[in-house]
Amino acid sequence: MSAHHVGRRVSTRVLVLGLLAALAAGGAAGALVVGAHSSAGHRAAGGQLVRHKTTTTGAGAPTTVAATATTSTAPRAPRTLRLVAAAPASGSSAIAGNATLTLTFSSPLAADSAHPRLSPATPGAWSVTGDALRFTPTAPFVPLSSLTVRVPAGRAGVRSRTGALLPAAVVEHYRVQNGSIFRLQQLLSLLQYSPLAFSSPAGPLAPNDTAAQLTALYHAPKGTFSWRQSGWPHALVALWQPGVDNVFTQGLIMEFQADHGLIPNGSITASLWLALVQALSAHTVNTGGYNYAVANKTPPESFTLYHNGAVVLHTPANTGISQTPTPDGTFPVYERLRNQVMRGTNPDGSHYADPVQFVAYFFHSDAVHFMPRADYGIPQSLGCIELPYAAAAKTWPYLAYGTLVTVEN
């Protein structure tokens, strides 16, 4: 047998064995290698793997033809980007005033990706680090403010390095922690609403330094309070507690709220904090001084009004009868009416409709007001503090929103 024929048999056998091996291994089309020299192969320019395939001519001479492999193991880039985590967690109700907000996505982000929008607008900047977007404030958030982070989607939204996009916008919500009550009391003192003056050994903060003022809402400067006047009764002095949100502080808050277009309810809100900082910056201070009233139920019953530590009125008064007594305690004035027809039910079940004047409500349906009586100084009302006409007329301008009224025996 000639060498030509031997070579022909070998080529056919190798072809069959190579095909069976490829099928057994589940080889991919285009990666199939056949021929006597198929195992050698070489790499062409550019790194492509070039392998050899042997065929035969009509005369039986083997011919080698180069075949280029086209397989690739690189994973396909995802087309959709997802927000996978938020820190602090969305819905957190007491995040720190200087908290960094971090949004983590399913893929690394493009350096020039669009940024989320923070509302209300806050000084600070967004930055991209790998798969995360971070907002770092340069000034603290306003205490108790509600923050909304809107993450844009689509072609104009956040995108990954490979071009993956968010399919829909994402909205995250946060609520900031409360500020320092001690600082709240300081601000009310600096704005002249408190009967106590505040001083700090480090000196006052610059009113127009917004960042410093916002920082102080969480980290109150050290300092001391002192009474502006010495003539206040013990009942008021005993109510003062630095750093405590009690009725004394609530009354101060209500006075400030009434003067600055806020609902005078004594509640601490983001609007209150912001208004305090703005008032300090604008040097908008209280010019009406501080007022306080005491109703004494020891016979003969009386009503005493104080202004800036001095008594401006002392008069006989009526309080509630035993069936409907005027409650003991201290309460802030929460509503004022020049006149009104008071309607209700007497203890015997009958109804009344009494025209009254100079009305200042301090506890539920109980108010200080003028009520015509034959005499004063004994329990006669259904819980209100009744005054003679001249005394009520003089008292009413002093009983502003937040003015404390103490009822005692």
Image (cartoon, rainbow, N blue to C red):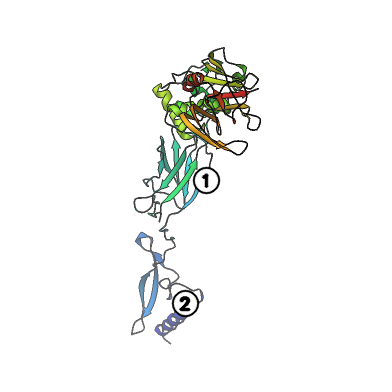
Badge 2 vs badge 1, beta-carbon distance below 8 Å: no
Observer-nearest of 2 and 168: 168
Q: CA distance from mark 2 to mark 1?
A: 59 Å
Is 217 placed left or right of 235 in the picture?
left
Q: Quadrant of residue 376?
A: top right
Q: Amino acid at mark 1?
A: Ala
Is 145 placed left or right of 241 in the picture?
left
Residue 393 is situated, as x and y percent measured from the top left of the image, at 47, 21
Q: Earlier in the sequence, mark 2 or mark 1?
A: 2
Residue 174 is situated, as x and y percent measured from the top left of the image, at 49, 42
Outermost residue toward the front in this view: 374
Relative to residue 380, is residue 60 depicted above or below? Answer: below
Badge 2 marks a residue whose secondary structure is: helix
Name the quadrant of the N terminus.
bottom left
Q: Residues within 10 Å of mark 1 (few under 14, many from 20)?
A: some
Badge 1 marks a residue whose secondary structure is: loop
Q: Quadrant of residue 69?
A: bottom left
| Residue 262 seen in the current view | yes
Is 216 placed left or right of 49 in the picture?
right
Q: Amino acid at mark 2?
A: Gly
Q: Nearer the viewer, mark 2 or mark 1?
A: 1
Name the quadrant of the C terminus.
top right
Observer-nearest of 56 and 199: 199
Q: Which residue is mark 1?
A: 89
Is 217 placed left or right of 43 in the picture?
right
Q: Which residue is mark 2?
A: 18
Observer-nearest of 388 and 385: 388
